[in-house]
Every structure is written in structure tokens, then in C-alpha cells.
Amino acid sequence: MAATFYYFIGDREEHDIDNLWAIFNAALDYEQLYSEESRKDFIENFNTVILQRGIKWNLTMGLYWIRPEAFINLDAKNRAFISTDKNMTSEFVDQFGVINKMPGGEAYLDIIEAAHASLESRDFKYSTFPELSFHAWHSTNRMDETNSSLEEMIEVRLEDAELSEYASKLVSSKNVILRGAPGTGKTYLARNIAAEVASGGRIRSFDDLDEQYQDNTQFIQFHPSYDYTDFVEGFRPTIDDETNEMRYEIVPGIFKKFVSRAIAAQSEGGAFVFIIDEINRGEISKIFGELFFAIDPGYRGHLGAVKTQYASIDDESDVFYVPENVYIVGTMNDIDRSVESFDFAMRRRFRFIEVTAESQIGMLKSSVDDYEDAVNHMLRLNNAISEVEGLNSHYHIGPSYFLKLSDIDNNYELLWQDYLEPLLEEYVRGFFDEVTILSDLKAAYDGKHREYEDEN
């Protein structure tokens, strides 16, 4: 989201800055006074500012920044979140539906008032706009095995040889990270690799794993609040059965429990695969702690045994190690801002495998009515993205986005409007000429851009 709300001199109108100050002051007055006069003043200034170049939805974010309890942020994540009666009351959803059109000042205040009423009338996990925004962000970035949305269950149709090649890289390297552009099916690919390795090549689809092999795999997703106590071990409150009093005891985290299962099965020769989706979203050093050493491919087994943070409390001699039969697969988007903070000590313990948009085109073959047309739209758009200064192949659009065509009657305009344009707007937000860039990308997508037209 842009931190500035205006263009440079020569590209903005004379009163753009003054108008921004006016809506800023009007917002503060409205929040404090809540009078008819302050409401009228706010609406008038709001309607003036949204006409300025490069503002649109950004204005609601700016208002949220200055008074988060009073003004709702209508970015793409929040708009999607509040459009379903799972997250808001049915009355709110019936009244506003999916908010795709930028509201005027009066409509924006109506949304705010209805949203407040919705949050107060039902027992949601959130009761304020900041809490709602957090849950909206979390819900759109979370990936768990019970979520069956198309985005998360992309079917990457790989030839057996290709999948075996990925699996072979995991077996030889112990730790791999699948990296690449959005929509390339990295998560689904990671799950299928896990199925291949855990089953010894007998099963190539994660969904086909039977109970035996399912126990040999684990899927989690990192997020900013994930920490060492979730992953390795930590104190958790428990109720004493005899005294009925609360006490704290050390409880193993999800990775430590998984490793214990792998150690117990070593004599049977089974492979165990641990999948970490969005691995770069967590604070790696905080989550892994001393396990940096233990997961190193060169120090597996007792050679890499370490004392965990709470080991000395129960048993001074207790150590933890990661056995040879544990394999780790991570996924991450190259363009995610948190990629830059990915710990260098961790980087050298993983093999990074790029998954490109072009390499996954095959997933469209049996999923869309006109395979060639879908591929041409994708390639034209990606070629145009690569031509934009500041963007590159990491920003390409993966074929999973085009799988949505089957749900919208092959309507390419609707695909652009509801799925591609919002993502591309985030790509170029803050660019000097973002309006022109988006226009050029749309022309390329449509096959009308002179540089990207089909030569035939």
C-alpha cells in the first residue's frame, strides 16, 4: 500500500495536497464531533479527493491509519473478507454485497456504520476494525488442509518423470524450498512431492495417501506470530488432575512431535516429509532457534544433537536431533516483502528450486475449454510484465489464476477485473506512472498492445 497519496509536480493538480489536508482535518473532526455538519464536511472532502489521480482505495487506508477504530480500510483483502456472511452478518452482506466499485463519501460512512453494527450484533472473533483487518489478512494468507478453495488446491499436472525429479532433489538435499511467482502451484506441488517421497514412489498425489503414509507427512504454514513454542517446545498451562489447579509444563511443538515419530520409525526405513508453506513469512531465527544446526543436511542424527531451550528443566542430559529420514519442503513467493529478511544462516541449509509460471502451463490442458487461448493470454501478460522497469519474471502470473476461467464461463474480462488487476495494482502501487503501466498490461493481456501482438 502506498505511503504517499499524491503525484509529483507536473502530474498532480494544483490543489491536490490541500485537498488531502482538508480530508485529514475533516476526518478528525467527524471522529471527534460526529455531528451533521462534520459528516457533511467529511463527505464533501472525501468525494473531492477520490477523484484525484492515484487515490481511489488508498484513501480508505489513509483514513484507517489516522483513526483505525473509526474508519475501515477497504483494501482488496478486507473487501473480500467482509463480502461473506461467514465473516459479517447476513444483513451487512445483503446490503453491500461484494464492494468492487469505489464508494462515495456517504456510501463509505454507511459501510462503516453498518460494519460497526454487524460486529456488535454477533460474537465474532473480532470486534474492531484493526482486529477485523488482522483476521482478513490471516484468512487470505493462511493455508491449511481443511481449506478447499481453488487457490489452495491447484492441480499441478506433472509428468511422472518431472515429479520424480523434484522428489529426487529433496531426497538428495534433505531440505528444499520451492520458490517462484504467485499462482504457480508451489503448495500443491510440495504436497505431491511429499506423497512421492513418503510413499517410496508408490503414490504421486497427496490426496491419495492412505493413513499409513499420511502419518509420515505434516503440513503447516508460517505466519508472523508463529514462534519457537509452536514449532519446537514451550510452556503450556494444564490443569492438575488431583488438585484441579493450573500449572505449566513443557509441551513439544509440532516439529518436535513429528521428529519423534520419525525417530521411532527409523528401523522400518520410512521417510517423513515436513511441509512448511510460506516459510519466509515467519521469523525464521525465532522459530527454529538452535535447530539451525540440527536440520543441516551434514549434521543429521546424533552428530547434530542440540540442547533445546528448556531441556535442562526436565533432564540436563536431554538432547534433540533430526534423523536422516526427515525431509523438509518449504514454499515461498519471490515477491513477498519478507523474502528479504529470510535468515542467511537458514538459506545455506536449503536447496532453492525455482517454479516458473511457464513450467506449469501444463496444468491448464484439461482444466480450461480453450487451452491455447488461456496460455496466450498468460504469456502476453507475462511478457509485458517483464518489460516494466522494476518488475521481472518473479512478478509473472502463474497458470493457476487461469484455472478460474472454468468458474466464470471463460470470461477473460471478469478474470482481469476480479483477479488479475487487483494483484497487478499491488505490483505497481507507488510507481510514478502506474495508471499507464496498468493500461499497457491490460492491452497486452487483450492482445492489443503493439509490442505483444501475435505476429500472425
Image (cartoon, rainbow, N blue to C red):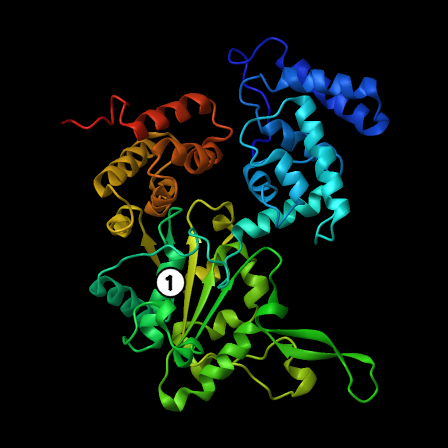
Which quadrant of the rendered structure holds the N terminus? top right
Residue pushed farthest bottom?
A: 267
| Residue 232 x %, y % | 58, 73
Position of 84 relative to 47 (above/below): below
Q: Is residue 409 left or right of residue 315?
A: left
Q: Is residue 24 left or right of residue 161?
A: right
Position of 444 relative to 208 (above/below): above
Name which residue type carries label 1.
Answer: Ala
Q: Nearer the viewer, residue 185 or 264?
A: 185
Residue found at x 60% / y 61%: 226
Q: Is residue 172 left or right of residue 96?
A: left
Position of 158 relative to 183 (above/below): below
| Residue 128 x %, y % | 74, 44
Position of 354 relative to 38 (above/below): below
| Residue 454 x %, y % | 19, 28
Q: Secondary structure at mark 1?
A: helix
Residue found at x 13% / y 27%: 456
| Residue 3 x %, y % | 60, 31
